[in-house]
Amino acid sequence: MIDLERSLQSVGKKCFVEHFELFTDQTISKTDAIERLMRLDNICESSANTKVYCAGRIIKEGCANEALTNIVDSVKVPLSWREKAKALLVV
């Protein structure tokens, strides 16, 4: 079992919501996902690798909805992120 809070913190709540489709698309390789994050978010390779790895763990462990719920319930997260997280929730 993963430490969801720690993994979500490593990905970043904004990144997890903004790139949720990228993280859940099984047709995209880890290498391609890392390259896309580097380009889209202007981050270094090691940071992109960490984000892709941790997001993948959250999803693989079946904790995506729990992570999205965490974001929806976070009062410190901007409303736009919470709204997107709510829209992504699979009930």
Image: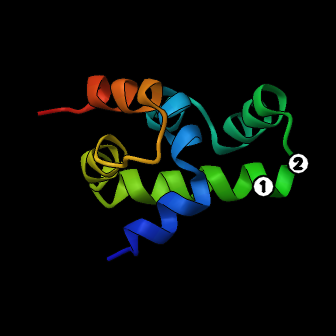
Task: Determine whether label 1 and label 2 are within 8 Å by CB.
Answer: yes
Name the residue at 38% across, 67% down. 4
Of residues 60 and 68, which is closer to you in this image?
68
Q: How many tags in the picture?
A: 2
Q: Residues within 10 Å of mark 2 (few under 14, many from 20)?
A: few
Residue 65, horizontal then vertical, whole percent: 25, 45
Q: Which residue is mark 1?
A: 47
Name the residue at 68% across, 59% down. 50
Quadrant position of residue 87: top left
Q: CA distance from mark 1 to mark 2?
A: 5 Å
Residue 85, horizontal then vertical, whole percent: 35, 32
Quadrant position of residue 60: bottom left
Residue 44, numbered circle: 2
- The quarter in which the C terminus is drawn is top left
Residue 83, horizontal then vertical, whole percent: 35, 25
Q: Amino acid at mark 1?
A: Ser
Badge 1 element = helix
Name the residue at 27% across, 29% down. 86
Q: Amino acid at mark 2?
A: Cys
User: Is residue 57 found left or right of 10 in the rendered image?
Assistant: left
Residue 66, horizontal then vertical, whole percent: 26, 53
Badge 2 element = loop
Q: Residue furthest left?
A: 91
Residue 71, numbered circle: none
Compared with 56, 9 (above or below) is below
- The quarter in which the N terminus is drawn is bottom left
